[in-house]
Amino acid sequence: MSSKHGSPAGKRRAYFQLQTVAQRLRTTADRLFAEEAGITTAQAAALMLIENHAGCRQSLIAAQLGQRESAVTAMVGRLEAAGFIERRASQSDGRAWELWPTESGTDALRRLEAALATVNGYIDEAIGVDEVDGVVDALQRLSDLLDHR
């Protein structure tokens, strides 16, 4: 590298900006999600996956969220204790448990719609509705690149 911040991303401190914005966005969303449904963004992501893949196993949640299964075990325990999901013995594998949303879990996701709309509104306002697709596409390309490193 020819200078301290040789690349265009380095000159604009892109990594730092992405980290800072991601943390602030997560903090804002966590506050809104807690107000609306009493759960964190991480718990909401797991609950959404369970809602969309009813009867799935923890390993799917861990893989989709990029988490270790031990971290997901604790999160699933909290969701179950809150009454948002239930574990049922698998009919096909006696050692496995399936995760199912409860009516309370589905209701919590409905209550989160306003919070999600607020967060997405901040993104639209800051980026501009005409540029959102390009930014999301670029973030997906970055994610894909990092998956192969």
Image (cartoon, helix red, strand yellow):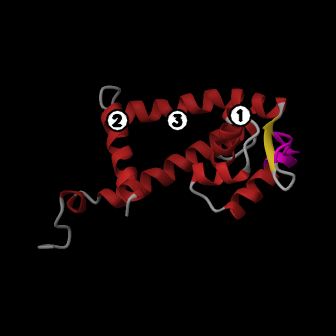
Q: Residue at x 15, y 73 (%)?
A: 1
Residue type highlighted by circle 1 = Glu
Q: Which residue is under mark 3?
A: 119
Circle nearer the viewer, 1 or 2: 1
**Which residue is at the front of the view, 94 or 130?**
94
- Identify the mark at residue 127; answer none if there is no mark: 2
Quarter in which the C terminus is drawn: bottom left
Indicate whether 129 appears above or below 126: above
Magenta-colored span? 79-92
The amino acid on which the numbered mark 2 sits, given as a three-letter code, is Ile
Of labels 3 and 1, earlier in sequence is 1
**Local crowd size for mark 3, using a 10 Å CA cut-off: few (<14), some (14–19), many (≥20):** some
**Magenta segment includes 91:** yes
Image coords of residue 58 (percent x, y) = 72, 52
Q: Is residue 39 left or right of residue 148?
A: right
Which element carries disc 1, helix, strand or loop? Answer: helix
Q: Nearer the viewer, residue 69 or 130?
A: 69
